[in-house]
Image (tube, grey):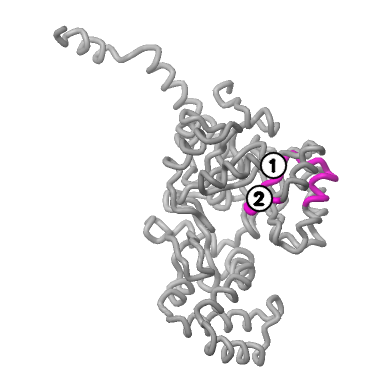
Amino acid sequence: MSALNTRLTEMLGCRYPIIQTAMGWVSDANLVIATTRAGGFGFLAGATIPAEQLEAEIRKVIEATDSSSFGLNFHMFQENAAQCVDLAIQYRLRAVSYGRGPDRETVQRFKDAGVLCIPTVGAVKHAVKAVEMGADMITIQGGEGGGHTGGVPTTILLPQVLDAVDVPVIAAGGFSTGRGLASALAAGAEGIAMGTRFMMSSDSPTPKATLQRYLDTRDTQQIRVTLAVDGMRHRMVENPFINKLEAAGPVGRLWIALNSARKWKAQTGMTTGHMIKTFIRAIKDDPGATSQVIMAANQPVLLQRSMVEGFPDEGILPSGQVAAAIDRLQSCEELIREIADEAETCLQRLCQRMQHPPAEQADQHERIPA
C-alpha cells in the first residue's frame, strides 16, 4: 500500500491516512479502538467525556490496542481542559486536536512530551496562526463538514492552506469514499479526516433510532446550516426541533431555549422559577442575544438527547452533507479497508494514465496539422 504511505501515517503511526474525528458523545473508547485496530487513527472526544471517566477511557484504548497511537480532542474553554492536557502528556498520546487552541506554553509542553498538535481550522488565516503557535499538522474542515463549520468548501480551502503553510495538511469535510481519499492525496493533502462516516458505522455508540434518522436522510438539502442554535454556523440534519427554533421570533426562541433548559434541569440547573425570572429580565434587555447564550449552554444536553438518549426529534443532529450519500452501516474495519482499496485503485489508475496516454488521444494528436 505504498501509495497510501504519507507523512501522516509516518507521524501518527497508523497504517492508512484516515482519521476518525472527535464527535461529541460518539467518539468513545470503543470507536477509537475499532478505528485503531482497522489501521486508522482515532480521537477521543474529551469535551463530552465526564472528567471522572476520562482517564479510564484513555487506559481502555491503550490496554485494548497495546498502544498510545491515538489522540485526544479538547477545548481550552472546557472546565477540565488542564486535565486533558495533563493526561495526554502523562500517557504520551500520539496527538491532540482542538479548535480554539492552547497558548504557546501549553503547545511547548506537548512538544516536549512528543505529543503532536493537530488543530482543526476553517479558514486560511487560522491555519497560518496555528502553525505560528507551533502546530505540527493542520486539519482543514470545509463547509461541507458537520457541526460548527465555516463557509468555504473543501475544494477551495485545501489548496489555499497548502499554499499558505509548510506543515502536513489533512482534509476534512465531504469525505466518505476511497475516491475522496485519492483526490485529497492527489491535491497535496497527507490524508483525510471523517466524522459523519464513522458516526454512521456499526461501531458507533449512537442509538439505533438516531442512526436510522441519518440513514433516512437522502437529500443534501435536509443537511443544512442553521444559525438558530447559538448564532454560529452549524450544519445539521433538519428536524422538528430546529424547524421550530428557526420559525420562532426572538421572544419565542428565548422561550424555547429556557424551556429546553428547564426540561433537563438536572443537567442545566434551570428551575421553573429561574426560567421565569430570566425570561422577564431578557424581555427587557435583548431576548435574541439571551436565547443564543442559553442555547449555547444547552447544546451539550441537546446533543446528548439525540446522540445518547435516542430522541432525534428533541435534540440536534450535527452532520456533514456526506450523510445523504451513506446508505449502510459498516464496521470500522470494513469501512477503512474499502476506502483504502478504492483509493489505491484510483491512484494506480491515475499513474497509468500519466505513463500510458490513451491510444486515441495519441492518434488524435498526430492528426492535428502543424
In this view of the protein, which residue sits in the foreground, 51 or 240?
A: 51
- Name the disc covering residue 98, or none: 2
Q: Is residue 98 covered in magenta?
A: yes
**Residue kind at label 1, given as amino acid type:** Cys
Look at the picture and state if 340 lies above or below 151: above
Quadrant of image for the N terminus: top right
Tag 1–tag 2 contact (CB < 8 Å): yes
x and y percentages locating residue 246 in the rendered image: 43, 74
Magenta span: 85-102
Q: Is residue 147 covered in magenta?
A: no
* Residue 129 in the figure: left or right of residue 109: left
Rendered image quadrant of residue 361:
top left
Which element carries disc 2, helix, strand or loop? strand
The residue positioned farthest toward the right in the image shown? 90
Instruction: Give the residue at x 52% y 82%.
Output: 286
x and y percentages locating residue 359 in the rendered image: 27, 12
Q: Residues within 10 Å of mark 1 (few under 14, many from 20)?
A: many
Instruction: Give the residue at x 52% y 36%.
Output: 164
- Name the disc covering residue 307, or none: none
- Name the disc covering residue 117, or none: 1
Rendered image quadrant of residue 3:
top right
**Residue kind at label 2, given as amino acid type:** Tyr
Which element carries disc 1, helix, strand or loop? strand
x and y percentages locating residue 86 in the rendered image: 83, 50
Instruction: Give the residue at x 48% y 53%.
Output: 150
Quadrant of image for the C terminus: top left
* Residue 96 in the figure: left or right of residue 331: right
The numbered mark, 1 or 2, whose residue comes first in the sequence reads: 2
- Visible in this render: residue 67? no
